[in-house]
Image (cartoon, helix red, strand yellow):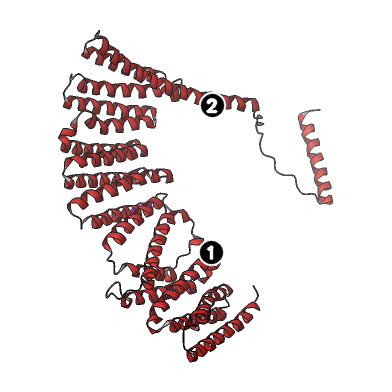
Amino acid sequence: MDLNQFEQRLHAIEARLAVIEERLSLPPPPAQSGWHEPKAPVSTAREADLNALEGSSNSGNWLGTIAVVCFVLAAGFIIKLSIDSGWLTPARQIVIAAVFGMSLIGCGLAMLSTYRGYASLLPAAGVIILYLSVFAAHRLYALVSVDAALILTSLVSLLCIGLYLKIKHDVYALCAAVGAYLSPVILGFHTQALFTVYYFVCCSLTFATLSIWLRSRIMTIIAAYLAILITSLIGLDLKDDVTIAIVLALHFLIFALGTYLFTRVNQQELTEKEAWGFFPVLMLFYAMEYFYIDRSYPGLAPWLSLVFAGLLLALYASAKRWFPDGRIKSQSVIFAFVAIVLFHSFYIELLPADIKPWVYVVMMLAFAFVPFNPSSMKDRSTWYVPALIGFIVLAIEYINIINHLLQRSSMIGSDGPAFWLPVAFAALISTWLVLIYRRDDLAHNDEKGSALLGAAHVLAIAGFYRLADPYGSLAVSACWLFYAIAVMAFAYQRRDKTMAKSALIVLGFAAGKALLYDAASTPTLVRILCLLITGVVLYGAGFLMKKIAEWEK
């Protein structure tokens, strides 16, 4: 049978099959794609070998780290032995140590093609030995001048940066920054402290620029810690607070703008871990900058602190526009720092004592009327620190108001009733406005709603006590009773069972005082009136509670 006949028979078979499928109403067969290479099964033995290899590699890295420590100690003992025995001149001792360090760097670079991660440890040991050699050449033997030693350590730092470019290991960024910032201190530049702090500014500019070029955040973080910490420590003995404050401000500007430009140039935002890595150095800068400014110009320190916080907030607002969702991962750190600065510099230092109690009123009014729903927020962790600080401020002023209301004081001014009564009732009204206008939000969190109700009731008890106390104890009880029945009536109108039950506590407290104390210590006519009023209030409250109990839960 030739090929043409074979094709004709195939076409005939296909035609017959098509007729059968049409009569049976069968779906057409799916279209077949081209031929695919079958997937080779994954070998579990191969996976086990890879896991074992990874485990052995980690073990090897630990061994390599220990070996690095051994090499550094060996170099140190070589120098010590030569000193004790005297068989080498000081110059030869330093040369041998330097050659040993360069040899480790060369061996590590030669091994990069085989075991890159493991071999990268050797150049790190060599760099440390080179630093120690330069320090010993100046401090121990005075073979080189202090200026030459500083130049040599700068060259070693440049070598570290070159190794970082080739190996891409963070240990070289660490060595470069630590060596650059500690060199003036170790070499004895503390006697020329002004030169040292200016040298640190140059180092900060260099590392901030290099971090953008090398795309290394860790270099910026390490340099910021070292620059601000060492400058602050030097300033304690320098007795020039203004200069140290200016230099610290320069460090802040350099690293803040460097981080901002890193994000702009590389289109790479800070990760949340990197952002929180900056938080301790921000707090260190804030504390030391405030300390040095306050020693020279006490009234200026809080204002400058607010300027620094505002600058950081402005950089954040500008940077987040570069990303499509308008959010960057560093915002939690920015908001935390700004909240702490506002709490200390503005609330504690700048705000007058007479105005502070009104902060409670302003914050509660903001909670009541500003459209802000924490339960629907995507990034609730961003607001943890600001929310905590806000709660602390509210608690401080709330306790402050209650404390002054319960004190028996005849003083005029900020300690007298004429001042604290308006604040107390404004705080009470603002708290009730939150309960009214934030009812839906509080309904999702019974604990917060109950706590806010309790705070409002305590404010009412203390406020009405201070208001009615000059008119006698019975007037205080009457105010409490009418407040409790007003709350129950309002709860009845809003069909709020929790609010109605909370008013029973105030009602019971007021009724107990009226029956046990007021009725026993007043004349008969007043006692009868007291009992009648208490009975009417309790009966009315009971009637309302009967109605409330009939509501569906």
Residue under numbered circle 1: 447
Segment tinted magenta in the rendering: 317-322
Q: Residue at x 54, y 89 (%)?
A: 532
Mark 2 nearby-residue class (10 Å; few <14, some 14–19, many ≥20): few
Quadrant showing the C terminus: bottom right
Residue that carries the numbered disc 2 in the rendered image:
54
**The residue positioned farthest toward the bottom in the image shown:** 525
Asked whether the residues under the numbered discs 1 and 2 touch, taking CB atoms below 8 Å apart as contact, a structural biologist would say no
- Which of the pair 259/334 is nearer the observer? 334
Secondary structure state at the residue bearing disc 2: helix
In this image, 457 relative to 23: left or right? Answer: left
Tell me which amino acid carries mark 1.
Glu
Vertically, is 336 above or below 524? Answer: above
Residue at disc 1, secondary structure: helix
- Of callouts 1 and 2, which one flags the residue occurring earlier in the amino acid sequence? 2
Which quadrant, please, contains the N terminus? top right
Q: Which mark is residue 466?
A: none
- Nearest the viewer among 552 and 530 is 530
The kind of residue on which mark 2 rests is Glu
- Mark yes or no: residue 350 visible: yes
Count of labels shown? 2
Q: Whole-percent x and y of residue 375?
A: 51, 61
User: Residue 326, can we see it?
Assistant: no
Residue 200: % across, % down = 23, 37
